[in-house]
Image: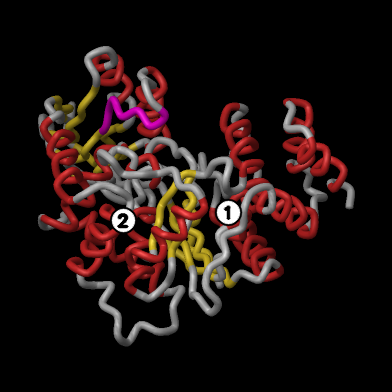
Amino acid sequence: MKGQTIIDNFAKVQSRESMDALIQWAKSEEICDDEIIYLTKILANSGKILKLPNKSLSADIPSTGGPTSLSTLLCPLVLRELGFVVPKLGVKGRPAGGIDVLAQIPNYKIEFKYYELLRCLKENGYCHFLAGYEFVPLDVVLFSYRSNENAKSINPLVISSILAKKIALGLNHIGLDVRVTKFGNFGTNWEEAKKNSLRFIRISKKLGINAVCFLNYLNYIQQPYIGRGESLVSLFEIFYEEPNSLLRKHLYGCINMGLSLSSNTKNCSPYTISILAKHFLDNLVAQGSSEKEFINRVQEIKSAHKYKIHSPKSGFLIINLQQLRDSIVWGQNYISENKFSDPCGVIFKNFSNAFVEEGETILTYRADNKIKDEFHNKLMFSFQINSSLDSDNGYEKIT
């Protein structure tokens, strides 16, 4: 295989030169499935391989990235109710990946040694933790480099990165939440995302993993709580309050993805929010935190939403997700006192394509004093008020 030498060089020495060569090779249209599989196995076997009990049904629903979706937080709870073991290995997201959000909860443990992971899974059946030196260390290095070099959307590397984590954790079922957007990591349009999804399913099968992909247009907000802390607020709204129509619709979409991975749903109640809340609270305890600490953190976030942006005129609200994401990521990078800093966030009071009156509140936001004014200015470019509706939204399941 043409790429094997390049992959082997990277595996031996993770230098700028070897990673640049790997990235350039992965951009080639001539790359074949077997080369992607070879890289996947190299990444997976660079650390430990989790040994689950025989006949364990294990699953996960990762995503291809993109703001406003909660699938990486809600789907594991559905999978637990369906009887799956869910070891979930995460990496830093932009602006609010699953592990980034959970890291905001005081005392929530996100780094595990091998024996600690086994204990957590035995107690709870679900463990959400950060990739590191124990599991897929080569993937961690490569992913970090790709992020810094604006090379996250190279499809062969995306496929290898996702599947390497699943192989390392012994998973036998996977559902991929493919978020189709102009700035997406798995295709900038529906046709490209569908082509890449079919390739993902084909390669997964060769690696012994049952896979399904869910294609969702991300040209509108999936739910209105955007940011690391705000995602916690959304979970609170689901579990303790009455979620608004958009949040409830998104919840049911996540439930549907989970159900698609199981053929045995007769005795399960994933549509019961109280059941999902129990799985969430059980996981909090298993990973060192508590319901009280979760609620306290949520209240801190909610009370910090002191600022509002109003509509400058009447019309239909069009939200620019890329600008919105970039605004929050800018704030996180500007104030980065820790790996998962959380200096800002947004809660939309109106949804994509909603009609708003002049002077009506579009969103509230919180921001550290050091970035408040500039963050406000950036948010003003994250939406516009049009005289007509935006394009329709789409959905497709691929098996």
Question: Residue at 62% of width from left, 42% of height from top?
Answer: 137
Task: Name the element at disc 2.
Answer: helix
Task: Name the element at disc 1.
Answer: helix
Q: How far across and how far down the image is residue 244, in percent? A: 16, 54
10 Å crowding of disc 2: few (<14), some (14-19), many (20+): many
Q: How many marks?
A: 2
Residues in magenta? Answer: 339-345
Question: Residue at 33% of width from left, 25% of height from top?
Answer: 381
Question: Residue at 36% of width from left, 26% of height from top?
Answer: 327
Q: How far across and how far down the image is residue 210, in percent? A: 58, 72
Going from N to C along the chain, the mark reached first, 1 or 2, is 1
Do callouts 1 and 2 mark residues in contact (Cβ within 8 Å)?
A: no
Per the image, is 301 magenta?
no
Q: Is residue 387 visible?
A: no
Query: Mark 1 against mark 2, which lies toward the viewer?
Result: 2
Instruction: Tell me which amino acid carries mark 1.
Output: Lys
10 Å crowding of disc 1: few (<14), some (14-19), many (20+): many
Q: Is residue 122 visible?
A: yes
Q: Which mark is residue 286?
A: 2
What residue did someone put label 1 on?
165
Q: Quadrant of residue 395?
A: bottom left
**Horizontally, is 146 left or right of 122 in the view?**
right
Per the image, is 340 magenta?
yes
* Image position of 35 with respect to 146: above or below: below
Instruction: Tell me which amino acid carries mark 2.
Output: Ala
Question: Residue at 29% of width from left, 48% of height from top?
Answer: 288
Q: How far across and how far down the image is residue 250, in percent? A: 29, 58
Q: Nearer the viewer, residue 194 or 78?
A: 78
